[in-house]
Image: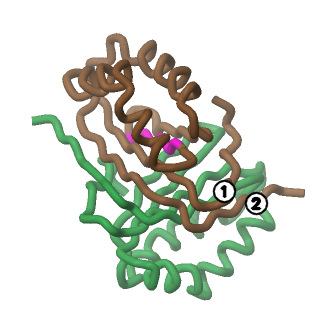
Chain colours: A green, B brown
């Protein structure tokens, strides 16, 4: 994933904000996370993703989708659901997910 | 700001996703950022904020507000607008802002 921010799309579209604090038990996390980053790209309506991580602390992932149907496809993907179960069992101390419909957006780039 | 994720509120509410890459010129950034973090707390309808920063790379701030009126109050705050102008002039190489109405949310906490 590049470190430039994903640019604004034409609203409406969806932003899924996933904020996490992880446990000490991270066996398998990295491979599964990389696999999910690949898998989501195949979801029709997936638009892109931003990710930032405080070293040893809070992580934020924001994934963008074109519409509610795309969200449903990703939420009900069997491999994704298995990863979510393992996440709750092992990798995450706490997380919050906010599913939100974007009404306005704007990108600034230095000339 | 604590490093635990902000917990889910009862929808609907707003999430403002602000993704940034900064320039080399960061004179004054830290003080202004700290001031904005204090100032936003006085906005009626402000609910909380998550922030994560990749060292030397992408930063993501997500601020939560109760309604559109709270967003307008913050967007039109004169001191905030001055900080935004200075941000575009000096501190940000690029940024995107997504203003989104949360439809569903959920918090997980390890027992």
Q: Is mark 2 on a helix, strand or loop?
A: strand
Disc 2/disc 1 C-alpha distance (Å): 6 Å
Label 2 chain ID: B
Place residue B38 in its image quadrant. Answer: top right
Q: Give the range drawn in magenta.
A: B58-63
Q: How crowded is mark 2: few (under 14 residues within 10 Å), some or many (20 or more)?
A: some
Q: Nearer the viewer, residue B47 or A27?
A: B47
Q: Using residue A103 as the reference point, say whether residue B90 is left or right of it.
A: left
Q: Mark 2 points at which residue?
A: B108
Numbered label tally: 2
Q: Using residue A58 as the reference point, say whether residue B108 is left or right of it.
A: right
Q: Is residue B104 above or below residue B46?
A: below
Q: Name the residue under label 1.
A: A96
Q: Residue at x 44, y 65 (%)?
A: A101
Q: In this view, does A109 lie above or below B76?
A: below
Q: Which of A17 and A50 is in front in this view?
A: A17
Q: What element carries label 1?
A: strand
Q: Nearer the viewer, residue B3 or A103?
A: A103
Q: Is residue A37 above or below residue B58?
A: below
Q: Residue B12 appears at what percent x and percent y? A: 58, 60
For the C terminus of chain A, the image quarter is: top left
For the N terminus of chain A, the image quarter is: bottom left
């Amino acid at each position: 994933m590049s470190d430039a921010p994903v640019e604004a799309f034409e609203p409406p579209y969806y932003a899924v904000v996933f904020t996490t604090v992880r446990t000490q038990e991270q066996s398998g996390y990295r491979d599964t996370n990389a696999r999910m980053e690949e898998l989501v790209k195949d979801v029709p309506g997936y638009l892109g993703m931003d990710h930032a991580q405080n070293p040893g602390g809070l992580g934020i992932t924001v994934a963008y989708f074109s519409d509610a149907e795309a969200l449903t496809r990703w939420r009900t993907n069997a491999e994704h659901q298995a990863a979510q179960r393992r996440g709750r069992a092992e990798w995450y101390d706490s997380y919050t997910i906010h599913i939100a419909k974007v009404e306005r957006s704007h990108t600034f780039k230095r000339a």
